[in-house]
Image (cartoon, rainbow, N blue to C red):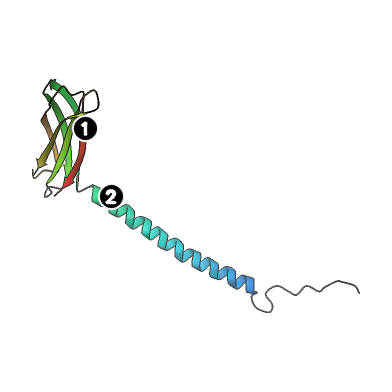
Amino acid sequence: MSAVREQLPEGRYGRSADARADRKLKIVGSVLGVLLLGVVGWIGYDYVSGKSAFSGELIKFKVASAQAVDVHLEIRKGADVSGTCTLRALAESGAEVGRKDIAFEQREELVNEVVTLRTTERATAAELVSCDAR
């Protein structure tokens, strides 16, 4: 009888070393996956909750004159949160021709306000730079 080897029944003498290693890899992979999912969830929650405290949006602007721009802002915040938004006006060349910080201390969650921004020369655009809670 030449090179015919007899095949042993699978699993009859316990698990092979490969099967044990595969099981350990699956456990380690599952634990790492759960940890990664937890970290991503925590970062996402922190991002969403941090941004919702005080935020502003420039709805529209209108060049009122060569020395002023009217800016309509909408502010979303908690009723007990106050903050400041910074606006700037830009000339056609891109140069900043006006800047103003506006404080919002109203006890409302949604504030719509039209603000006049004075400029040093005719502005062609207005921009909401930032809004920060205090």
Residue 102: % across, % down = 11, 38
Give the camera-side residue of 9 and 50.
50
In front of the other: label 1 or label 2? 1
Residue at figure coordinates x 49%, y 67% from the top left: 28
On the rendered structure, is 118 left or right of 47?
Answer: left
Density class for disc 2 (Cα within 10 Å; few <14, some 14-19, many ≥20) is: few
Tell which residue pokes out farthest to the bottom in this image: 13
Quadrant for the N terminus in the image: bottom right
Label 1 – label 2 distance at C-alpha: 23 Å
Residue at figure coordinates x 63%, y 74% from the top left: 17
- Amino acid type of the residue that numbered disc 1 sits on in the rendered structure: Glu
Give the camera-side residue of 2 and 12.
2
Q: Say if 113 sits above or below 43 in the image.
A: above
**Which image quadrant for residue 8?**
bottom right
Residue at figure coordinates x 25%, y 51% from the top left: 49
On the rendered structure, is 29 left or right of 97?
Answer: right
- Amino acid type of the residue that numbered disc 2 sits on in the rendered structure: Val
Residue 116: % across, % down = 10, 29
On the rendered structure, is 34 left or right of 42?
Answer: right
Q: Tag on residue 48? A: 2
> Disc 1 or 2, which lies upstream in sequence?
2
Density class for disc 1 (Cα within 10 Å; few <14, some 14-19, many ≥20) is: some
**Which image quadrant for residue 124?**
top left
Residue 132: % across, % down = 18, 46
Tell which residue pokes out farthest to the top in this image: 65
Residue at figure coordinates x 14%, y 23% from the top left: 121
Which element type, helix, strand or loop, lies under badge 2?
helix
Q: Say if 13 sits above or below 114 in the image.
A: below
User: Mark 1 — residue?
Assistant: 127
Which element type, helix, strand or loop, lies under badge 1?
strand
